[in-house]
Amino acid sequence: MSSSNRVDLKPPYLILIGEEDDATYAKTGLGIVQWRPGQVAGQLRFPGCRVDLGVPDMTIDEAVQSGVGSLLIGVAPVGGTVPQQWWTLMENAASAGLDIVSGLHLKLADNPAVVAAARQSGARLIDVRTPPAGLPVGTGIKRIGNRVLTVGSDCAIGKKYTALALHEAMCNAGINATFRATGQTGIMIGGEGIPIDAVVADFIAGAAEVLSPDNDAGHWDVIEGQGSLFHPGYAGVSLGLLHGSQPDAFVVCHDATRTSVSGWEHYELPSVEECIEQHLSLGRRTNPEILCVGISVNTSELRADQRSAYLSELSANTGLPCVDPLIDGCGAIVSYIKQHIQDENHESSG
C-alpha cells in the first residue's frame, strides 16, 4: 500500500482567489505563496476581492502568455464548494492548456465541461483531496521512530505553517526529519501526503498510521495537524489524527488576538492551558508518554511592542518555549525537544 498520495504539479502557478474577502479561507493560496514563492506567477481575483496574496494580478490569457503551467484553486471555503461562475473560468483555463489543481472536496472530474476542455487541450485535472485506496482501521500499535504533531485551538490558525517551520528548524539542527502533509495545501507544498479530512471516519487513525510508518529510531516525522478538538464542526478529524499519529510531542498553535472559533463566533476559543490539557488527556490513549513541547503563536495582529511581552508571559505561564514561527523560527522548540525527548531517548537506548 502506498503510504501517501504523490502529486506532480506543473509550475509556475496562477492562484484563483475569486471574490474571497476573508484571508482565513484563502489559506491555500497564502500558504503556497509563503512556502513556494518561486513557483507562483500571479493571482486571479474578481472585482471587489479584498484578499491580496501580494503577487501580480493576471487573467487566463495573460497567464498563458507568461508560461503559467497550472491554475490552482487558492481558497478553502466552508463546505469545500465554489460559485458556479468559477466552473466557466476553469473550463476556459483548461481549454487554454493549463492544468487545473483543486484541493476542495468537489471533484474536477465531475464537471463534464471541464473534463471535455481538458481532454481536448491535453491539460490535467488534479484533485489533491483524494485519499489512497485501502486505508486500514487504526491499530494503536506503537511505531519505531519519533513523531511531533501540530495541534490548534481553532482551524486555520497556523498548524501547517508551524509544521513546515518546525521541519525546517529540525533539518537545520541536523535532525533527520520528514514533513508529513495531511491537508490539500501541505500536499501541494510537500508533493505528497494524505488529505485526512477526506478519509472515511473509521479509517482516519489508520490513515495517520500509514502516513507515518516505522522509521529509524532517531527519525522524526513532523505531522501537519487538522481541525481542532475544540471546533464544533471539525473535532472528529482532529481526534482521529491525534490517536493515529501517536505523537511523542505536540505543539499547540494559537492566535494572540482571536477570541472565538472562526466562522462559529458563538463558540469561545479555549485557553492555551486548556488546549494542552485536553491533548495530553486524549493523546495518552495511544501514547502514554505524549508531551507538549511548545506554543506557536500567530502574533500578526499584535503591535510590535506587544509581541515580546505576550510571548514571554505565555512562556512563563506554561513553562514552554513560545514563538511566532514566521518571525522567530522554531529553533527554541527544537532545543526543547532535544532536551526533553531526543537526548533522553538516546540515553535510555545507550
Image (cartoon, grey):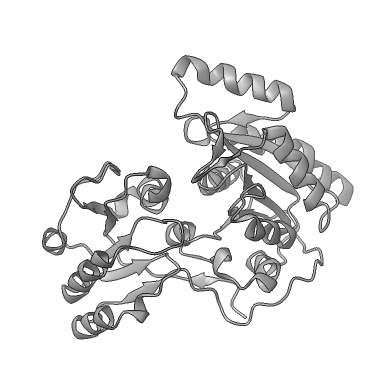
Q: Indicate the position of residue 258 as horizontal and vertical percent values.
A: 53, 33
- Comparing 99 with 192, the one in front is 99
Quadrant in the picture for residue 275: top right
261 horizontally vs 45: left or right = right
Residue 350 seen? no
Residue under the point 61% across and 37% down: 269
- In the picture as drawn, the residue positioned furthest to the front comes out as 266
Q: Quadrant of residue 333?
A: top right
Residue 336 in picture, x, y percent from top left: 71, 35
The N terminus is located in which quarter?
A: bottom right
- The residue positioned 35% from the left and 75% from the top of the image is 108
In the rendered image, residue 268, in percent from the top left (x then y), is placed at 61, 37
Horizontal side of 97 relative to 259 (left or right) equals: left
Q: Residue at x 40, y 53 (%)?
A: 28
Residue 230 visible, this orientation: yes
Please tell me which residue is depicted at 45% across the width and 64% down the height of the picture: 191
